Amino acid sequence: MRTLGTKTNSRLRRLRPWLVCMLVLGVSTAVVAQNKAIGFKHGMPFSEGYVAGNALYVAGQQGPDANGKVTGTDITLQTTNAIAAVEKVVKEAGFRMTDITSVTVYVTDLNDVPKMNEVYKKLMPDPKPARATVQVAGLIGGAKIEISAIAVKH
């Protein structure tokens, strides 16, 4: 019996490096396999979001009206629609709004921040993610607001 046990131990010692390599390869393949673009349309210069491992990066989302226009709409409607657009990307990626850890809000007029905050506080779940609000000279399409976000699955 001892001889058989010694042979078995010897075989296991020789196989161990291969088993470790296979395990590392399997784990790294699983992590790479999670990387994917969300809402990418061929011909467009960006994706709506990108999943990398357990993180989701949401591209800047604006708040167009039902006709796809942002001009002529107020900051309240644009903020509501921008957050809804973020939520759409988050859900499509298989994340939840509570997974959002960081938000960047771009506004063209700092005077709009109080009204934007009213909507933001109602629609973003608690606890609120870390946030930066930045005034910019302009946004594509004449938007008043654009919101980007980072989410991490816990």
Image (cartoon, rainbow, N blue to C red):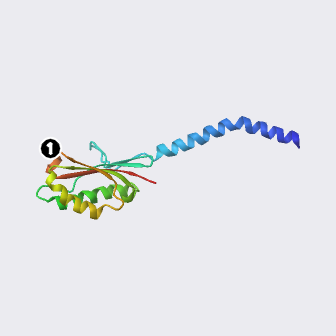
Mark 1 neighbour class, 10 Å CA radius: few under 14, some 14 to 19, many 20 or more: few
Residue 82 visible at all: yes
Counting from the top left corner in percent of width and height, residue 84 is at 28, 60
Count of numbered badges drawn on the protein: 1
Give the amino acid at mark 1.
Ala
Q: Quadrant of the N terminus?
A: top right
Residue shown at 20% from the left, 52% from the top: 145
Query: Residue 119 or 24: which is nearer the viewer?
Result: 119
Residue closest to the eye, 131 or 8: 131
Q: Quadrant of residue 63?
A: bottom left
The residue located at (27%, 58%) in the rendering is 83
According to the picture, the residue beneath numbered tag 1 turns out to be 137
Q: Residue shown at 14%/59% (left/top)?
A: 74
| Image location of residue 27, percent across then percent down | 55, 44
Asked if residue 69 shows in the view, the reply is no
Q: Position of residue 40 (x, y in %)?
A: 32, 48
- Residue at horizontal 47 percent and vertical 45 percent from the top: 33
Q: Residue furthest left?
A: 72
Q: Residue furthest bottom?
A: 122
Tag 1 secondary structure: loop
> Quarter of the image holding residue 99?
bottom left
Q: Is residue 66 above or below residue 20?
A: below
**Relative to residue 67, is residue 27 depicted above or below?**
above
